Amino acid sequence: MSPAPVIIAIDGRSGAGKTTLAIELAARLREHHKVSLFHLEDIYPGWDGLAAGIERYATTVAAPLRRGEAAHWVSWDWERHGDGAARRTEPAEIVLVEGVGAGAAAAAPYLDAVVWADASGPDRRARALARDGDSYRPYWRLWARQEDAWLAADDVPSRADVRVQSLADGSAPDQVLRALQYVPALAPALAPELSGRRGLELRAERLEAAPDAARLFAELYGGSAHAVWLDSSLAEAGGFGGAAAGLPWGAEAAERSRFSILADDGGSFGEAVRHRSGQSWVDLGQAAVRVEGGFFRWLDGAWGSRALDAPEGYPCEFVLGWLGYLGYELKRETGGSDVAAATDDACLIFAGRAVVLDHREGTAWLLALAGPDAADWLAAARTAVTRAALPGEAVPAPSGAAAAPHFRARDTEAAYKAKIAAAQYEIAEGNSYEVCLTTSLAATAADLDPWPTYLALRRRSPAPFASYLRFPALTVASTSPERFLRIDADGGMRAEPIKGTRRRAADPDQDAMLLADLESSPKDRAENIMIVDLLRNDLSHFAVPGSVTVSRLCAIESYATVHQMVSTIDARLRPGTPRAEAVAACFPAGSMTGAPKVSTMAILDRLEAAPRGVYSGAIGYFSLSGATDLAVAIRTLVVASTEHGAELGLGVGGAITADSSPPEEYDEIRTKAFGVLSALGAEFPAG
């Protein structure tokens, strides 16, 4: 008896291109493995024999091969319309089974993966009749009715690990091989084909140019369905120790604002992933793979090992990789309860090419993985950077033609203050020390365009962790000032929680008084110090013993609409620690939960009685260098496209302690919402 082979089913309706895909996959896999290819058309008992053929295949082919035994089966003689010769299939290292029903439920216990090939009905019929027109044409409808009946009872497409579209251009086999790297059962067996990100080569160019980031993003990615701009609007406002409208940004804010990253998922290496409730879908263009299991487990496999080093002289930690958001509901994987949100729990793109702007040096870096389209993209990006650096008008803000949206609050003022009292009761009972209570505002806008809305938002409220994320049917526009977690390629870790907020005032003397009030507030210092202690604990789970330090405690940073109290906690990651696990150990940000984290998240679930979605999660990147830099998703407008326009969502909240004043806490959420609402011309809802 031989070792059990890896069995991959390639299924789909007739004419979907399964045979070509299977033959090309087999050719690639045979470079490193012994591969056998089994065609189900050899075993179907006639033109009305789909169901019987599936049963024959499952019992006489798939079952013995799964046991590592040779399969003995009877072929079908299509000319004589009867059973043909006895056949034997040996268990090779990899067996590809191709045909309608290859992934059927009867065979599922014996399979390691199912690939489903999709194509439109006219394309499938034309392809099938072009191949077997004389013999197939009289039976097309008969066979199609059998496929319909089978799929009505056995939904293989929804169960498939990989789905493939549009097989005509020849790139599908390579994309399917890339997709299979995410199927846990296959990755160990199919190396070196599925070698993750190893062996990649980076091409990098440094340009002496300081392009307008908005113009550059619009030119390079204006037509991209998936695109990310990790912005640095604070830097463009003059943030490096200088004055932006007279605001004292400070050195730490300047450091956070040094780089802007612009990317989409285009090119031969591009991918996008969305995760919801324990299932991820990774989209590679023509192929998409379904991965069961937790998000952080997926992230560890996709990002967890270092694959690229930074080029010489390159100052940024981002060396291509994954960019996007992690939603708050991923807390189900880190000790929180399972709450379903209307938005995906995570959306990321894999950028195999990107532009990184260094605002301190006034340079632009073009990064691309070496591939067939790298040279063309580098040339196009070089031209775009040059054009965006020329004098010209900035991308315009909204014209004002669109009506300001009217927001409605999830909680009335009275209801929110009652929840504050309920949180204080939990604190008095010893169930929490600090409860970071939140609520949300929502509006419907028929004619809102997210792009100019974000440009207005970044002008109104520049911030070091501003970002613009565009996904199909969802846009995230954020002006976050708060770092959640940074892990450098060399293992340095940093968290910078914000707790304590005061509004800005137009009068300089009044503004200084507000700043001084925040700086001297015992309550705000207590809130901040509690979260510092929580984050010291979070970082310590994977830190080198003794490396956790607080380098800045309760410092004040000032932004366009608010003053903030910020602390900095540093640590060093233990060598060999899975980096995705280190991120998970700190997620969600303690500044958005309270302390202790797990029990307080349960309190928040009861009090808020609604998912937070993107809000309170994280936005940033996971670099192929092993580095990550994530902001807390606050001051963040979420725009979901609908057939009637757009649904807008804005989360706001604050930390509740035993001595919190409900009126002051309610004023604080109004202050935090002001920057986003004012950019939209909207007001905080009354009542």
Image (cartoon, rainbow, N blue to C red):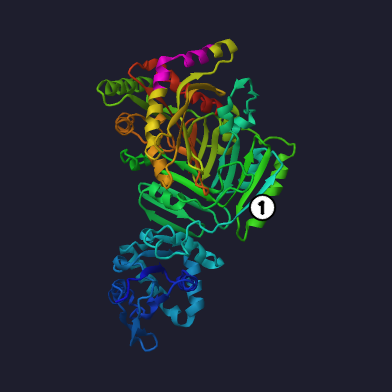
Q: Position of residue 271 (x, y in %)?
A: 51, 53
Q: How crowded is the residue under tag 1: few (<14 C-alpha within 10 Å), some, or many (20+)?
A: many
Residue 685 visible? The answer is: no
Is residue 332 visible in the rendered structure shown here? yes
Which secondary structure lies at badge 1? helix
Q: Is residue 206 above or below residue 463?
A: below
Q: Is residue 680 left or right of residue 526?
A: right
Residue 24 image offset from top left, x and y in percent: 50, 72
Q: Nearer the viewer, residue 366 or 216?
A: 366
Task: Name the residue at the right extreme.
Answer: 391
**Is 680 placed above or below 358 here?**
above
List x then y, in percent, for residue 619. 48, 39
Residue 25 is covered by the magenta coloring: no
> What secondary structure is the magenta-colored segment mainly?
helix
Q: Is residue 142 above or below residue 303?
A: below
Residue 426, by quadrant, is top left
Residue sitting at x 45%, y 54%: 282
Residue at image position (60%, 38%) is: 259
Residue drawn at x 37%, y 89% as measured from the top left: 80
Q: Is residue 524 magenta?
A: yes
**Range of residues picked out in magenta:** 513-527
Identify the residue position indicated by label 1 in the image: 378
In the picture, the quarter occupied by the C terminus is top left
Q: Nearer the viewer, residue 450 or 47?
A: 450
The amino acid type, in three-letter code, at marker 1 is Leu
When asked about the image quadrant of residue 117, the answer is bottom left
Toward the front, the furthest residue is 546
Counting every numbered tag in the picture gives 1
